[in-house]
Amino acid sequence: MVTSDEILARLRGSDRRALPRLATLVENDEPRAVAALDALYPLTGAAHRVGVTGPPGAGKSTLLATLVAQIRESGRKVAVIAVDPSSPISGGAVLGDRIRMMDRHADDDVFVRSMASRGRQGGLAWATAAVAHLLDVAGFPLILIETIGTGQDGTDIAALADTVVIVETPGLGDGVQAIKSGLLEVGDIVVVNKADQPGADEAARVLRSTLALIPDPNARQVPVLKTNAVSGDGVDALLTAIDRHHAWLQDSGELMARRQRAMRAEVLAGLRAELDRRVALAPEGVSELSDLIDRVARRELTPRRAIANLAARLAAPGGA
């Protein structure tokens, strides 16, 4: 039986394959990985989790690659979890521009993991939280979590991250959608990337004006920054803003409140995943789920009542 100390020694030691191997087991919900994470979980909670989201084409991956370089210049280790849209058939992640970060593959203090969202709304897989815990205990003080930010689903990032960075671009076509969807309301830092393009100053002005209208119970002003991910301009200011927000979270006591909300969201997401798993294991065509759906289709039962019946069945001893 491998002890938690032995697992920890491997994760933080010279075996470079230990972390990606265990991350794969955690992502696949393997029993060995679940047991290992259970043993290591009391050691988590030290890492600063930074969510980076925004519309496709905003340059998030390029910005993250430049930000990772900036973080390494400060002497800190950093991990990146990139959550991609999944194929509904294969469940595989689409890497896209993430290859830009792979030029640091020889750097032991940088870890990049691309994960499939597996159909989860908001692009956050249930396994993402577990992998974040693993990276936390492996000794990465900064964990960057990149997700797609399309529509209202993009606000899911707030449930997992301590600090949320919203990335927008000049033109504000997507920015207006972000305003409508409520994405800006969960942002702690807003970035106008591709600041060398026309309209960057106007985009920053509109975003500042919009943010000024959003009531903030913590009375904290959300900074709006301009960056050029390709040249690196403004990325140092972004890292400073991230560090300042973390300090504010600790000093104000907001960090604990956010962590409690994150744990609640994680538990509920896990419950949903477990329900999905149990329903999927039921034999198609003869399961109670199929019968309930047929009754709903025949208008013999309301969807709400079908859900209540299924929940009661699952909660019963020996339920599916």
Image: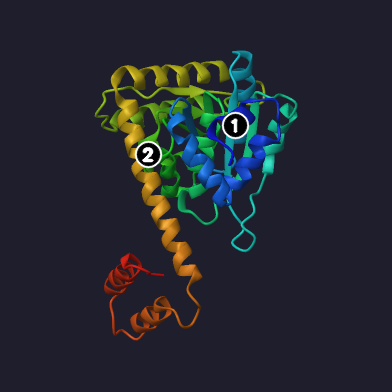
Residue 279 bears which disc, if any? none
What residue is shown at x 55% (from left), y 25% (from top)? Answer: 139
Q: On the rendered structure, is 193 left or right of 268?
A: right
Q: Nearer the viewer, residue 21 or 124?
A: 21
Q: On the rendered structure, is 199 left or right of 15?
A: left
Q: Quadrant of residue 138?
A: top right
User: Residue 235 appears at what percent x and percent y?
Assistant: 57, 20
Is disc 1 surrounded by few (<14), some (14 to 19) or many (20+) residues within 10 Å? Answer: few
> What's the CA distance linking mark 2 and mark 1?
29 Å
Residue 284, above or below 137:
below
Residue type at the position of mark 1: Glu
Residue 41, above or below 148:
above
Q: Quadrant of residue 80?
A: top right
Residue receiving disc 1: 6
User: Residue 68 appears at what percent x and percent y?
Assistant: 62, 24
Residue receiving disc 2: 262
User: Residue 309 appears at what percent x and percent y?
Assistant: 29, 73
Q: Does residue 290 appear in this view?
A: yes
Q: Tag 1 or tag 2, which sits nearer the N-term? A: 1
Residue 109, above or below 146:
above
